[in-house]
Image (tube, grey):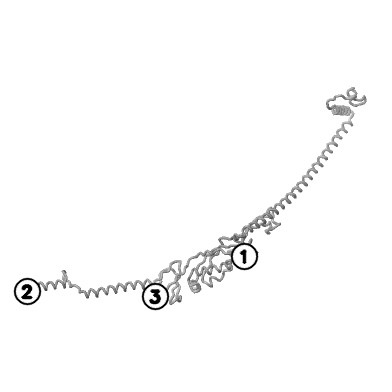
Amino acid sequence: MDNMNFTQNTQTFERFGSDGKKKKSDKEKKKGGKWGVFFGLLAVAAVLVLANSMVVTKQNQFKLIRQFGRVDRVVTAPGLSFKIPFIESVDTVPKELLLYDLPPSDVITSDKKTMIVDSYVLWRVTDPLKFAQTLSCSVTNAEGRIDAIVYNATKNTISNMKQDEVIRSRDGKMTITVDESGTELQGNDLDLSEGHEEVVNITSLTEAVMGQINHVEKQYGIELAAVEVKKLDLPDDNKQAVYTRMISERGNIAAQYTAEGKSEAKMIENTTDKEVSIMLSDAKAKAEATIAEGEAEYMRILSDAYSDPQKTDFYSFVRALDALKESVVGDNKTVILTEDSPITQIFNGRY
């Protein structure tokens, strides 16, 4: 009897725990595990669906929502939006200003001179829908079209310009020499002494190129903000020939300036000599007039002196002494005089 009670108690303990609660069977445990896995998978699926339905648009992006390959709508404002998961897809288009560095290219001027142009382009997408339709949302495709468009515009622009015009128009400013009336001095008219230098604004090379690019935005939905020339150079094989020609031209210009300077110097020298001759002639004429006036005054004084009998003897005495002084020169001091000589008469006391 006691053994039967012990067996029943043991079975009861196995069915209930030490706390008196009923234990679950293995079948019940398997059934609960299946439900846990189901709810776990359901939660994962819900997270995947939610993640696939959210569209995050950044400040520098456009988002194109496609439904079965066709663009259904375009998201332009930054923020969070939603789409139909697994049915709609998303393409991203850049919204910021992009830089494309064009490879250097050879172009020929109107005077048949080859030049190398190295430039870059700043561009942006303005119409993402047209950009997607024409260029498949590909930046690489857009850069390929930009390369061809800018190269053709540059080639057409430079082919209508001479080499020196291309070089002068690079920065849109040109220094010229003008006279007082504002007329530009060129060639033999160039005289820096009569003119002054002025900086004038001209159509730059990049402005001329941009003037030929007017269909890109309408055709591809992109805008070319700027086309800038980084480098404008000559091919290596004809650089030396161009340098030699430039040196020769500068030498001819220098020779022309030297010849003009010498001619101007000769004219100044001749003018100065003429003025000096005139001045010397005038001075000599004035000197001769002064001498004549002095001699006339001298003769007047003598005339006045000889007209007075009291002064006549004195002036005769003074002139006789002057004559004697002039005659006694050198080492020989001997003077031979006749009796009727005025000097003899002085010594004889007749005066």
Image coordinates for residue 299, horizontal then vertical, percent: 86, 35
Q: Quadrant of residue 73?
A: bottom left
Label placed on residue 86: 3
Please tell me which residue lies in front, 125 or 39: 39
Q: Is residue 107 above or below residue 26?
A: above
C-alpha span from label 1 to label 3:
55 Å
Image coordinates for residue 221, horizontal then vertical, percent: 51, 71
Residue type at tag 1: Ile
Q: Quadrant of residue 81?
A: bottom left
Q: Dot 1 corresponds to which residue?
A: 108
Image coordinates for residue 318, horizontal then vertical, percent: 86, 28
Q: Quadrant of the N terminus?
A: bottom left
Callout 2: 10 Å neighbours few (<14), some, many (20+)?
few
Image coordinates for residue 137, horizontal then vertical, percent: 48, 71
The numbered mark, 1 or 2, whose residue comes first in the sequence reads: 2
Callout 3: 10 Å neighbours few (<14), some, many (20+)?
few
- The nearer-to-camera label among 3 and 2 is 2
Q: Dot 2 corresponds to which residue?
A: 1
SS for dot 2: loop
SS for dot 1: strand
SS for dot 3: loop
